[in-house]
Amino acid sequence: MIERNSSLRQTFAGLFLITLTTLLLELTLIRVLDVLWYPNFAYMVITMAMLAFGLAGVYTSIRPAVTVHHASERLFRLCVGFCVFTLLLYPILNVVTFDFDNFSSAPVKSTISFVIIYISLAIPFFICGVILTTIFTLHDKHIQKLYFWDLLGAAIGSVILIPLLPRIGPAGLVFVSAGLGAVAASLFATSRIKLGMACCFAVAAVATPFLKSDGYLDFTFHMDKRKIKNVEQNTEVTLWDPISRIDVIDYAPGIKWIAYDGGTQTSYFYRFDGNFDKLRAVLPGEAHKHFWGRMVPISHYLKRDTDQKVLVIGSAGGQEIKAALTYGASKVDGIELVGSVVNLGKDRYDEYIGGIFNHPNVTNVKGEGRTFLRSTPNKYDIIQIMSNHTSSSIAAGSGAMASNYLQTADAYREFFEHLADDGILHINHHVYPRMITTAALAWKQMGRDNFREHVLVFEVQGYQDNLPTLLIKMSPWTEEEILESRQYMKIKLIEKPARFGKSFLSDDFYSGDLPPEMVKGIDYRVAPATDDQPYFNFIRKKMRRVDTDPDNYMSKSVSKLLNSRLQSGIPTDVIHFFVSGGTALTLSLVFLFVPLLYSDVGKSKWDRKGSFVAYFSCLGAGFIIYELIFIQTFMKLIGYPLYTYTTVVFTFLLGAGLGSLFSHSFRLSPQKLWSLPFLGIMAYSCAFLITYDAVFSSLLTTETWVRITASIAIILPLTFFLGMPFPLGIIAVSGQANGVVAWAWAFNGLFTVVGGLASVLVSIFYGIQNALLLATIVYMLAWMMYSRMRQPQVAKRSQVMMN
């Protein structure tokens, strides 16, 4: 008995380690591919690789372990295989490169490279899936405790990326993942030799990245984003911030390029001697030598020498801060999401940029714009945002379709509320017609009118201007101000008050209530973005090329932006939906029919088999929908995208693990209290939908740690109940043929991917609240399926009691 308990404790420990390692590896690879490719492609490939989890369930349902000794030997070999194939990712991703932009010119080579990378990514997850399903199948009587250790390991794995990534980088984390896998292997070792080998491998793998003294182990760039390969040899600094990888590159005389995530986004440190009078004397003529262009200092010029107070959201390399100081700002607050850039500007590059980050009038800190605004009562004369949003899948909180909470009507209300009576909101971002409809909705919600009198838009004509200049003034623009701004900018004023001439957009765009027929008729998405539908950058309606059509409000910049996202006729901004969805649909047939034809559990006849498949499919879909929607919802409360992602994922996994553990204490079974988790989920969902807005509002101005703690307390009751249905389902089918647990895992894993896609699509087209309702409905369906699935066990128990 003691030996059996010891073996079970080792199994719990091995399960904990392998799930911790797998989630750490998943998050690490997402960050790697965000840099090597783009976030949407990274999400697509990792999603497809994660389908290997479900495929492992199919494999185990056909070839289950039959004895404890057989299982131990299999688990040891699988853990060793996990270590080896995880470690191989480092050379493979450095040798085999794939560039989506080259697919049309070299389709065969690109396809081969992609397949090699995809298979290499999928193998560790497949092995992990086989490990988990083997353990669950062999010890199904302890499923509630096993599920607890599974989820607890994943919860820890979701948070340790943050402290480790800046220290050793993602390549180092790959080595650490391999080493932790070796520790798990040691727990399943069947001899002292195997135990010693596993321990030696673990020490060597974990130690390797920490022993490297000169920077990081790193990966080769795959895509040549912004021609970074031409200048990467001039890299002066590389830092893996938890939000973004930062490379500072000696780009040109007087310019240091700050490349975010391998060039996905960009900023610059401009050489500056600190002489603001000298700089002001050469503006605007030499603006391009000190800024991106005249569009950076224009608002500061209009407010010059008025002791203006300025807020810069996304201060990056400090261009906006320098512009504010040049024109006499008395106070400048800078907020930058990537703390490493702030530190570089204050320390290493302080002298290079003229000490602007350490100027006595400047407070430049790591932070998130809307979170900062909620915490300050200050009013500003200028709030400036230069195309500010994160390029990281993890930091954005979704990956599939990046949300942008700085471009919603709710955000514009907060901007307007923090502007002085004649303050200016200055934004440079693509697709200005949608910016105007979004801002107009906020303006209307605040009870204000005549919005057109307050808006100016400058746009370069004749080519794709991805950063048109939007200036919204809280008081109407005067004739003198418009004349000054035109003389300064020297480009076309495309939007202006009606009294100053015709504009590109009609008055409907400024009404705050764009007619539905216009929303439907325009060939891109112009409806206002809101916190409930924060996907401002998702503007595509048609999967083909679009033509410039001023009569239908399709400008050259918007049409070129949409067409630039077509590669060989394929829209790269939405391809991940089609590929991931098509792959999931194809594999669903494999997951269903292969076990039916080739496994004992599939071929055997048992009641409610259809309910069994539907039940575990609902659990996979419902859980991930709740998780992804809560990430988006709690972004409003916590603010910082990375903190939000980590808090929600950690709480979901920890809470579900505790729910599974306590379901054992509560003695949940097909005969007793089986409705409890479903009733809890329904009650919580209804209460949350009714109260969360008021609760969030009461917490928005508190400290970050208070909001994170409150978020954990709010989320935990739901996740506690979410952890109960999976082990409850395993208990209901545990008497069936060997392999039933693995088959349940397969459908649960498959529909995790399906549910993830569904959550994004529903939230884009119908809103986040409706996606939350969808998750609730999915669990209601699971409840119905369980009521059917439990009946054979109930009948069997009743018959035993009668006898």
Image (cartoon, helix red, strand yellow):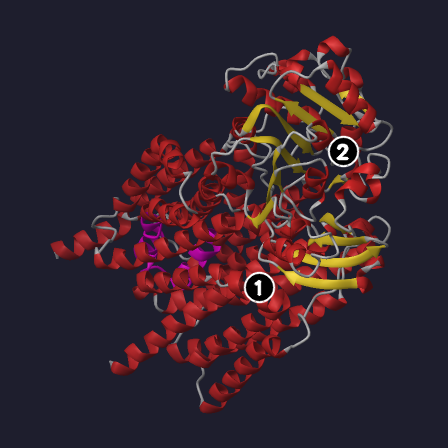
Q: Against 28, is 713 above or below?
A: above
> At numbered mark 1, what does the secondary structure look like: helix, strand or loop?
helix
Task: Give percent across and percent down for residue 34.
Answer: 66, 54
- Relative to 303, is 742 on the left or the right? left
Residue lying furthest top in this view? 499
Mark 1 touches mark 2? (CB < 8 Å): no
Does the rendering let one see residue 187?
A: yes
Q: Which mark is residue 349?
A: none
Q: Nearer the viewer, residue 34 or 124?
A: 34
Residue 102: within the magenta?
Answer: no
Task: Give percent across and percent down for residue 226.
Answer: 80, 50
Residue type highlighted by circle 1:
Leu
Residue 731: within the magenta?
Answer: yes
Task: Give percent across and percent down for residue 374.
Answer: 47, 36
Q: Which mark is residue 295?
A: 2
Residue type highlighted by circle 2:
Met
- Relative to 669, is 29 on the left or the right? right
Give the residue number, with chain letter if any, for mark 1: 165
Mark 1 neighbour density, 10 Å: few (under 14) some (14–19) many (20 or more): many
Quadrant for the N terminus in the image: bottom left
- Relative to 349, is 63 on the left or the right? left
In space, the residues marked 1 and 2 are separated at their CA atoms by: 36 Å
Q: Which residues are magenta?
A: 719-748
Classified by dominant secondary structure, the portion drawn in magenta counts as helix
> At numbered mark 2, what does the secondary structure look like: helix, strand or loop?
loop
